Amino acid sequence: MEDEYDLSKMKSRPNPYIRRLKKQVTLRMSPDVVEYFKKMAEETNIPYQSLINLYLRDCSASKRKLDLRWVP
């Protein structure tokens, strides 16, 4: 193994995992929703952002629809 390498001669390659990276978004959520997931995070020892992501992923995978009805 060499002590120093000349990296200027290396050819760059695209990251093969770029499609699998998470996308950062900003969401406005009710404080009670955030507290619910933070409490669950303490109980499960999983970060609350990960819990929210897991829940939304489960909704997406099961094609769950929101049952929303407006009451007059």
Image: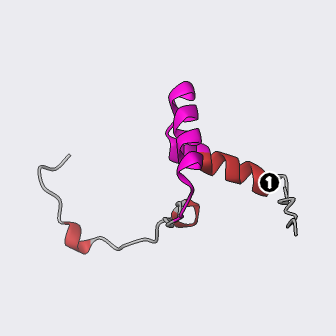
Q: Nearer the viewer, residue 61 or 69?
A: 69
Q: Nearer the viewer, residue 13 or 36?
A: 36
- Quarter holding the C terminus? bottom right
- Residue 40 at x, y percent in the picture: 58, 33
Task: Name the residue tied to disc 1.
Answer: 61
Above or below, 48 relative to 27 = above
How many residues crowd around disc 1 within 10 Å: few (fewer than 14), some, or many (20 or more)? few
Q: Nearer the viewer, residue 12 or 39?
A: 39
User: Which secondary structure, mark 1?
Assistant: helix
Residue at 57 percent across and 46 percent down: it is 32
Q: In the image, is 66 to the left or to the right of 43? A: right
- Magenta span covers which residues? 27-51
Residue at 68 percent across and 47 percent down: it is 55
Residue at 56 percent across and 58 percent down: it is 29
Q: Is residue 59 magenta?
A: no
Amino acid type, label 1:
Ala
Q: Nearer the viewer, residue 32 or 39?
A: 32
- Residue 4 at x, y percent in the picture: 12, 55
Q: In the image, is 57 to the left or to the right of 61? A: left
Q: Is residue 49 magenta?
A: yes
Residue at 37 percent across and 73 percent down: it is 12
Above or below, 38 relative to 6 = above
